[in-house]
Amino acid sequence: MAASTGITDRRVILHLGVQKTASTALHHFLKRNEEALAPHLMVRTPRQGTPTQRMGRAAVDYSLEPTPEREAAFVACIRELRDEILADDRPVLVSHENLPGAMLGNPGVTTLYPMIGQLLALLDAHLAPLVPHYVLYTRDMAAWKRSAYNQSVKTDGYPRSFEAFLTETAECGTWEGLSARIAAQIGASRFTRFRLEDEADQLRPGQQLLTLAGLDAATLAALDPIAHRPNESLAPGALEFMRLVNETGLAPGPRMKVMRLVMNNPALFAPDPDRAQSREART
């Protein structure tokens, strides 16, 4: 068991996401290979009802409204996770895409993770005596913004057009700037940035991260790939439908029901080529 004080050499990695850089695919990959990874690595992802899941939700809540009550809720989740880690002695990988805070498209968020410094300070303070290494994945900014817009419409109730989103976030900052802020907060030696484009295989996500966590090439090669990329973006028709729903100001509960309907029935919102050809033939 890890000692209760002065832990500096145990490998504890916090993967911060960010959102829309294949974090969901990574979590599916880790779950699929849970047994194979267990001898090498303690893995914590946002499974329902776990401290990691609650911690990510609390991070977003605090980043949107940094009240003492929300800070206390976030701190309680961090400490719960810390106690879980201290009860084990394996290297640790904690992954939750919400740890940097709320993404662009959330109410009032027009820059890249404006509260990340405060969130990292709380993580560092309340994970002690553990000394984590922080990891960030980034993605080509133009592609990321398009995907972030899709996600904001789908899950966060964003009601405006993509063009409006681009205007609102034109001065959001850069990945280099965000990385510099993180390094200034925790120290450059405890921070690594990976590019999503450098991942070798979309169906074996997180290879760079898992290598940093200590897995060797043979162990990585033996892991089973996932069957497909989960959490794909909505198709244009479905996206526009959800945007119009968001414009109505529907309450979160009913809106989530509509979103599930849209996600579970993509054919309802896809063009019908046979019908289009029939219309063309009549004109």
Image (tube, helix red, strand yellow):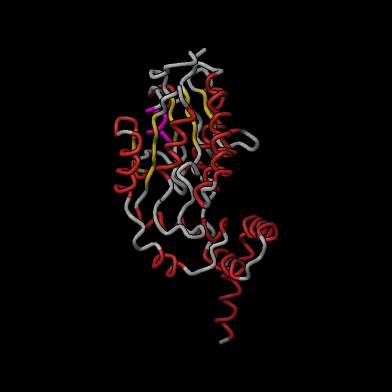
Residue 136 vs residue 211, the one in the foreground:
136
Q: How many marks?
A: 0
Magenta part of the chain: 205-212
94 w.r.t. 218: above or below: below
Q: Is residue 148 left or right of residue 251?
A: left
216 w.r.t. 64: above or below: above
211 w.r.t. 241: above or below: above
Which residue is situated farthest in the front direction here?
A: 68
Who's the residue at 43% across and 31% down the image?
124
Q: Does the magenta stretch include residue 206?
A: yes
Who's the residue at 47% across and 24% down the image?
92
Task: Provide residue 17's location: percent of width, then percent of height.
Answer: 45, 42
Who's the residue at 59% across and 85% down the image?
282
Task: Provide residue 186's location: percent of width, then percent of height.
Answer: 35, 34
Q: Is residue 188 left or right of residue 34?
A: left
Task: Provide residue 62's location: percent of width, then percent of height.
Answer: 53, 46
Q: Is residue 6 magenta?
A: no
Residue 187 vs residue 277, the one in the foreground:
187
Q: Is residue 277 left or right of residue 170?
A: right
- Can residue 57 be seen here? no
Residue 253 vs residue 203, the one in the foreground:
253
Task: Provide residue 195's location: percent of width, then percent of height.
Answer: 34, 43
Corner quadrant of residue 189: top left
Prevailing secondary structure class for the magenta stretch in the rendered image: helix
